[in-house]
Image (tube, grey):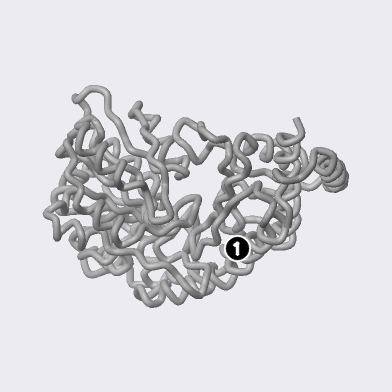
Amino acid sequence: MQTYASMEKTALLHELAKLEGYYENYKAQGLSLNMARGKPGSAQLDISNDMFNSLTPDTDFKTADCPDCRNYGGLEGIVEARQLFADMLGVEVKNVMVGGNSSLNMMFDTIACMMEQAWGNQGKLKFLCPAPGYDRHFGITQYFNIEMITVPMTSTGPDMDIVEKLVSEDASIKGIWCVPKYSNPQGITYSDETVKRFAALKPAAKDFRIMWDNAYIVHDVSDTPDTLLNIFDELKKNGNEDMAFEFCSTSKITFPGAGVAALAASENNIALLKKRYTFQTIGYDKLNMLRHVKYFGDFKGLLAHMQKHKAVLQPRFDMVTDTLERELAGLGIAEWAKPNGGYFVSVDVMEGCAKRVVELCKNAGVVLTGAGATYPYGKDPKDSNIRVAPTYPPIEELEAAMNIFCICVKIAALEKLTK
């Protein structure tokens, strides 16, 4: 297939006119399709409906460390839930705290805790932000007025040459955001070498922390899932156990609004967090923790549950990447990768065209995450990255949305090339 850049201007204008006709036909349909956020669709939410039967009036609400889950107490969470997450994260129970429904909330609290107890009186602070990355991570950092420094992503994770240089030279750099497995939005899993280099960091700031958001640790969507090296095993080898906080949740396993979140950390960091949590809460929703434990039974039960999610999601991801391949491959106007898991497909369109693609899609009834959202301060220096979220729309709507998306990518590129 001939690339757009190699075509004569007359041919480009002819192609643009043809595509604009297709585009106007879609606009006339008055569609309302949403691919903006990584939300589970109704078919995924239905998978966990039987959980509502896990607790009944006859349930024994006692656990190994809680005389009655209906009452106050249990700052760290019930031990059975802590064990479930310990098995998921590959750590010991003593290193796990279970919270409410939101891992994002636990991340926010962790940054707040570090601000109060370690970083607060040290002047202007900085944080490393691999990008493309997760906009809500950047939002937390900006809320605390911490300067964000963009670190480019590679096919094996953040550019570690840059990370190692920056953290070793600047004590005002206090941390880095990471989504190490099936990164948001690119679906990249950090290589073994990348994880080992993280664990061996020698930061100038002794209170430097890696925010290891393992949101998609069990979220495979292919028959060849990625594997991720255990960060805490590697930290121990380097005597750096205190350098990381790891986060996860069941938000995209059961119910996003009523899941269970957890964090893993060293004993020193757990103690530091408790200084805040002791005053912040008497304990989180132990009934919800118990409900999840009874529903899954153990980590093997949770993994079996994830196979049901895979059955729903795999066709959607295949549709997205197959459509991109069919409609855009060979034109020289877009790049993407097929992830083995996670919740997104990242598309890099022609430089300077992302905002225009999002605008065109919106006018045709397809809502995407805003261009620039995957970079700190919402500023994509190349105006090229777009995050596609295939999970929420019904599959027939997803197909229409992807067709419109590809038309818009072509139109934006042709507009630029024919100016």
In the rendered image, residue 358, in percent from the top left (x then y), is placed at 67, 39
Q: Is residue 241 left or right of residue 210?
A: left
Mark 1 is surrounded, within 10 Å at the Cα level, by few (under 14), some (14 to 19) or many (20 or more) other residues, namely: many
**What residue sits 23% from the left and 37% below the top?**
114
Judging depth in this view, the residue of 35 and 406 nearest the camera is: 406
Judging depth in this view, the residue of 145 and 338 nearest the camera is: 338
**Vertical comparison of 291 with 211: above or below:** below
In the rendered image, residue 142, in percent from the top left (x then y), is placed at 39, 30
Task: Kindly tell me whether residue 24 is visible in this rendering.
Answer: no
The residue to which callout 1 is attached is: 317
The quarter in which the C terminus is drawn is top right
**What residue sits 43% from the left and 35% below the top?**
139
Q: Secondary structure at mark 1?
A: helix
Task: Kindly tell me whether residue 43 is visible in this rendering.
Answer: yes
Q: Is residue 402 left or right of residue 46?
A: right
In the rendered structure, which amino acid carries the disc numbered 1?
Phe
Q: Residue furthest top?
A: 123
**What residue sits 18% from the left and 61% below the top?**
94
In the rendered image, residue 386, in percent from the top left (x then y), is placed at 58, 44
The quarter in which the N terminus is drawn is bottom right
Q: Residue furthest left?
A: 239
Q: Is residue 88 left or right of residue 236?
A: right
In the rendered image, residue 241, in percent from the top left (x then y), is placed at 16, 53
**Vertical comparison of 41 with 112: above or below:** below
**Vertical comparison of 253 with 354: above or below:** below
**What residue sits 54% from the left and 58% below the top?**
337
Judging depth in this view, the residue of 131 and 366 nearest the camera is: 131
Task: Please count the marks in the image.
Answer: 1
Q: Quadrant of residue 403?
A: bottom right
